[in-house]
Every structure is written in structure tokens, then in C-alpha cells.
Amino acid sequence: MGNKLWEKKYSVNADVEKYTIGKDAEMDMYIAKYDVIGSMAHATMLESVGLLDKEDLEQILSGLRDIHARIEAGDFKIDPGVEDVHSQVELMLGECGKKLHSGRSRNDQVLVDLKLFIRAKLEETVHAVKLLFDTLVSQSERYKNVLMPGYTHLQIAMPSSFGLWFGAYAESLADDMQLLLSAYKVANRNPLGSAAGYGNSFPLNRSMTTELLGFDGLNYNVVYAQMGRGKTERIVSQALASVAGTISKLSFDCCMFNSQNFGFIKLAPQYTTGSSIMPHKKNPDVFELTRAKCNRMQAIPNDILLITNNLPSGYFRDLQIIKECFLPMFDELCSVLQMVKDMMEKIEVNEHILDNPMYDAIFSVEEVNRLTLNGTPFREAYKKVGIDIDEGRFKADKTVRHTHEGSIGNLCNDKIAAYMDSILAQFPFERVREAEQKLLACGASK
């Protein structure tokens, strides 16, 4: 017989075992320390309702703290023949570990592990987004008076500025942060105690584990708690994909604006690569790879949707596969955010783009508006300026007088920063960290 929590008098065919376990051991390393934290809260609750005695609790908590320390030190692994992280932790606890599983299933155990993992990784992601946001706002202020052409249909359209360009992506990240906050709120609800999805006859205190783990509240309905598997990952991945979408668009702009045909920006040499045959090349490979990575991340919510979309209520093994695309997503996105922040800090801006007369036509709207302000009906002013352009008589006045909120002369970066700060203030990171640290420090006093 092997080391499987469910194994009885027979052994599974080796090929079936390999097929069903798949990459689970590898993926479970992402959630190992959260399995320990969730187990500490569960054990503390079991003792409070009489399902563990005090001595058992002390042994279990001591063992779990040791396992957590090994995980943090990189000295933890899932042994060959052990099915998953839940089995490994329980086996490492010895005899007292056999009492730990009362009142829970691996179904709600992995649910709480995933939610604790998501909370921690969302905190890392939020901090990485904020660092890039701050860089973009800083660059927006630095270059707010440097004009550049704006485009529609990839045709020169109207005057824009680097202040607007940098600031646009900053505000996009603020909206992305709103989605991250919503995803965090969905994830920060406690499924522990729902067992296999139908509750338990033991007198569990689910409110207690909710408080011990720092959750905002319960997933009350035990069937819905199980239905949250897959749904939570999809919602969270959609928020991460929204950030990736912002970065993908920024990357495309940077690749295009860095090309000689545009020459709007110049990337720092250390963020470009060369050609094996063309000695003049400085390729924007980093932004190209960033664009590809971000586009791949935007496909992950659809992967999760396709895995879960035709499943009825209850647990199914299909859900295991979600880990493979979902769990690595956070580290990939944080890596991208760090790299883009570094590149945007060192980007060089061309401050003389509009000296080229090919861009003179973008000031036509300014001339139409000037004539309108002087009493010419707008449609007549529009027609006159259009004819002047066609007949070569148009002379560009490159003075731009945009003063309304969010325009060239009034970027509202302070308002955008305040919007971002108002979202950040709603994340309960400190309270969550305190709850987890209390568990790890003293086994959570009741």
C-alpha cells in the first residue's frame, strides 16, 4: 500500500496513478506553506470543539510550525509515492497527524490553500503594479510639456504629449487595480468547513477559522463554497489579465515608437539586443517578449472557463488541471511588471518630434477652434481649414491651449494618484498578515 489518504485494500494501476496525479506534486509546492497555515487554524478550531485534546493540538501546531520553517528554507519536498502536499504534511506530523483531518476534506483543504495563496500573491502583484504606476506618473510629469502626434487609424490626428501618453497607462493601471481589489474580495472568503461540498456532522466552528485566517467572511453555503473552485481562479485571472492587457498595449507602443520610422523614444541600450548579421540593429526584444507573455496571460481566463464551463455542481477532478495555468501566472506577471518599470524609468524621449513639418496638419483642429472662437461657425471653419490644407496654404500655429481636465495642459495626475490611493486603502493586507503571523507565532490563542 502507498501513502494515499484515501487508499484502502487495493492499489491503483501505476499508469492510472501517474496519469491522475499529473503535475500535482509540482503545482502543490506553490501552495505548501498555505496548507500548513490552513491546517494550523483547523487544528486550533478542532481543539476548541473537543475533537482534539490540548496535548494533540500542541504537538500538531509544533509540527506544523517546523514544516512551515522547512518550506520557507527551501527544505521541503513531496516524497515519491506521496500523492500531494496534503498527504505529505499529514504524514510528516506522525501519529497526531492522523487526527488532523477530522471535519474536512481535501476539497475544502485545497480551496482554503488556494485562497491563502491568492491573497499573498495578489499582495505582491498589487505592490508591483503600484511601482510601475508611480514610474509612469513621474515620467508623465517630467515630460508633460513635450508634444507628440496623436493618432487615429494610425493616421496623424491631433497634438498629444508624452505627459498624456505616460499618464494614460498610469490611469489604466488604476482601473486594473480596481479589478484586483474585486478579485481579492472574492478570494478573501473562507471555504474551510464545507468539506467535500456538503458540510459535516461534527460541530465545526467555521467563524473561528475565518477569524484565525484573517478572512473577510465565510463562503456560507457549503455547496457554493465548492462551486467556487475554478470560479475564483477565473475571476482572479481576469483581473491579472487586465493588467497584462495594459502592459501589452504599452509594449506595442514602445516597439513602434522606438522604430526609426517613428523615432519618438529610444530604449536604453541594455534593454535591446543585436543581430547576428546586421551590425546596426538594436532590437526591442524585451518589449516584444513582454507583449507575447502578456497576450498569453490574457488567454488564461478562457482556459479556466473552458475547463469549468460544462461542469455541474460538486467536485470533479477536472479542476486539478487549472493549477497548471493559474498558479504560475502571478510570478510571470510580477516579473513582467518589474522589467517594464525598469525600462520605463530609463526610456529616452525625443523632445523635437514636431519640428518635422510632416506633422503640421495635426494642428488643423487648433486652427478650426481658433476661428470658431472668433465667431466663424464651426462647420464653415472646418471647411476653410480643410481647403487650405488641400491647397497648401495651411500654416500651423503650434501653440496648444488645452486646459480642461485630463488634457495636455491639465493632466490631473494628482487626481489619478488619489484614485489609485483610494483603491489601495481598501486592501486589508496588514490585518491578513497579522492573522497569519499570530498563527505561526503562538498557534493562535482561542
Image (cartoon, rainbow, N blue to C red):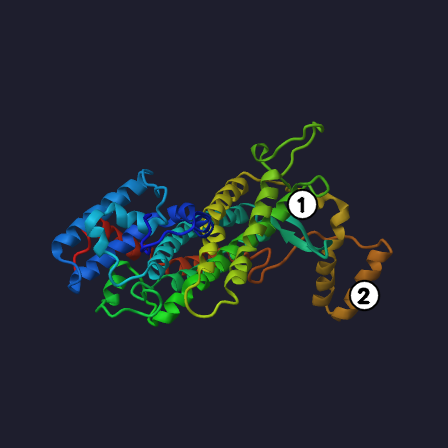
Whether residue 358 is visible = yes
Give the SS element for disc 1.
helix
Q: What x and y, as percent, mark residue 247?
A: 55, 50
In what quadrant of the picture does the C terminus appear?
bottom left
325 versus 104 height, above or below = above
Whether residue 34 is visible = no
Left or right: 129 as drawn, with respect to 259: left
Query: What is the distance, in whole Å, between disc 2 and disc 1 at their CAs?
Result: 33 Å
Disc count in the image?
Answer: 2
Q: What x and y, as percent, mark residue 315?
A: 41, 64
271 versus 32 height, above or below = above
Residue indicated by mark 1: 256
The residue positioned 24% from the left and 61% from the top of the image is 102
The residue positioned 49% from the left and 67% from the top of the image is 311
Q: Which of 103 and 61 is in front in this view?
A: 103
Residue indicated by mark 2: 383
Left or right: 63 as drawn, with respect to 169: left
Q: What x and y, as percent, mark residue 57?
A: 17, 54
Are the residues at dot 2 and dot 1 in contact (C-beta closer than 8 Å)? no
Q: Residue 147 has which mark?
A: none
Give the SS element for disc 2.
helix
Q: Which amino acid does label 1 sit on?
A: Met
Binning the other alpha carbons within 10 Å of mark 1 as few (below 14), some (14 to 19) or many (20 upward) gives: some
